[in-house]
Image: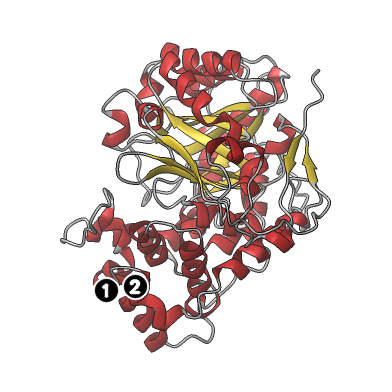
Amino acid sequence: MLNLRLHLRRPLQSLSCRGYTNSMSRRSQPPSPDSSPRLAKRPRLEYEPLTSEDYKNGLMLAPMVRSGALPTRLFSLKHGAKLVWGPETVDKAILHTTRVVDQKTGVISYHGKSRPIFTTHPVEKPFLIYQIGSADPDIAVQAAKMVQQDVAGFDLNCGCPKPFSTHSGMGAALLSTPDLLCSILSALRAAMPPEITISAKIRLLPSQEDTLKLVERIVNTGVSALTVHCRTRNQRMKEKANIGRLREIVEFVDRMGKGVAVIENGDCLGYADWKRVREVTGAHSAMIATAAESNPTCFSPTPLKDLEHTFVPSYIRLCKYLDNHWTSTKFCATQLQGQHESASRADQKALREAIVRAKGYDDIEPHVAPWTGDNEFSAIVEAIEKRAGQRAPPTPLEDVAVLPAPVTAAAAPTAPAVNGSAIANADAITKTAHDSETQTSEAQDTARTIDLSLPDTPLGYEAMAPVAAQLVQ
């Protein structure tokens, strides 16, 4: 086996040095003539290549179009996410980009015609899973080769039900074409070096038997992990996840004996909610989407509250430092809404209204100044360094025992019948967790009915969900 190592070479003292590059960035864009001398390097952190074990015993940031921007991923890592998925990027879109490295910040951008299609930073590379949207094995491989130097693994999107993904056979449409789905995974596994992992993210099929048959085929392609969004293609966020069906899938995959990690996705609210998910499903890890979109600190056992004071200004400062496009920052910032203890309604309203009205970073400066994004970034790097070369965060997940299965699963990896009462009982446990997310989903649905779209934002109505929430109350 190849003894390959991934290196995080990032001296904290020189975060703001203009000459910061890594070995890859120097090939993309040479340092400017006025680069300042490098400061003394700190000991480098070494990360072994990802394996299926790295996908276990952790909370993961889900792939989210637009919401999964670089600043959100970095803050998620700071607060305890074990791995982070980038937003789905369509294979053909990345093929027509140019890789550019910012010499001041180290940000790596894959620029399209008008703005970056994908943005990352070397500090997140050991934890970054790049999600591909594809319906063609050859194009998927070409896309993967474009960015493989900047990521730790690739994930195939087989679950997105939205038309922009499914209309060309991608996303959840692949659930109906299992031969194509598996051929893409097999092609990626064959083309990528062994130190880069391949995984897939699917949804439940209406039939448990069909779901298990598909899972068996996917596992046999050589994937390291499989994420199961516990909703069917036709279900939406306001409908609770069917996590009761996942237990059988996890046991099925375990009996196949390939060590593939099974990650639960759907209605997990954060660190404190992991126990419920693990007890019911037996999943090796959990992936968080909506809760992390609202509060990227939910991966911590002590997530931040009163985000208008404790997090939103820091988030916007980091975005400006990383030169994140303002429309992306605006969208993500308007999604942030955690619990409140001391922040007044007036404070909450003032900041949110300012973000909604702002047309650029200058407009929001009175509410977030001073611009200390470099300090925010330094704190993120310092938090990652505390992992000491391990992908697990300093505060590991609680070791939770799986509740006894109501029905003994079949011994062989076949598709056993579903026990309806057991699933109903397990699903009932999720109701409380799901209800806490319902208002956000209703707000987004309401926002669709009014003209609140932002310029240059294809899903702009979602950026105004907090405002629409007032119409739902």
In the depicted structure, whether residue 388 falls above or below residue 24:
below
> Does residue 210 appear in this view?
no
Residue at (71%, 40%) from the top-left corner?
A: 404
134 left or right of 56 in image: left
The quarter of the picture where the N terminus appears is: top right
Q: Dot 1 surroundings within 10 Å: few (below 14), some, or many (20 or more)?
A: few
Q: What is the x, y in percent for residue 159?
A: 42, 33
Q: Quadrant of residue 170?
A: top left
Scheme by which the image is coloured: secondary structure
In the depicted structure, whether residue 231 falls above or below residue 461:
above
Q: Which amino acid, by three-letter code, is at mark 1?
A: Arg
In the depicted structure, whether residue 467 falls above or below residue 204:
below
Location of mark 1 (residue)? 357
Callouts 1 and 2 close, C-beta under 8 Å: yes
62 left or right of 96 in image: right
Q: What is the x, y in percent for residue 359?
A: 28, 68
Location of mark 2 (residue)? 355
Residue at (57%, 29%) from the top-left corner?
A: 148
Residue at (47%, 77%) from the top-left corner?
A: 308
* Helix, strand or loop status at disc 1: helix
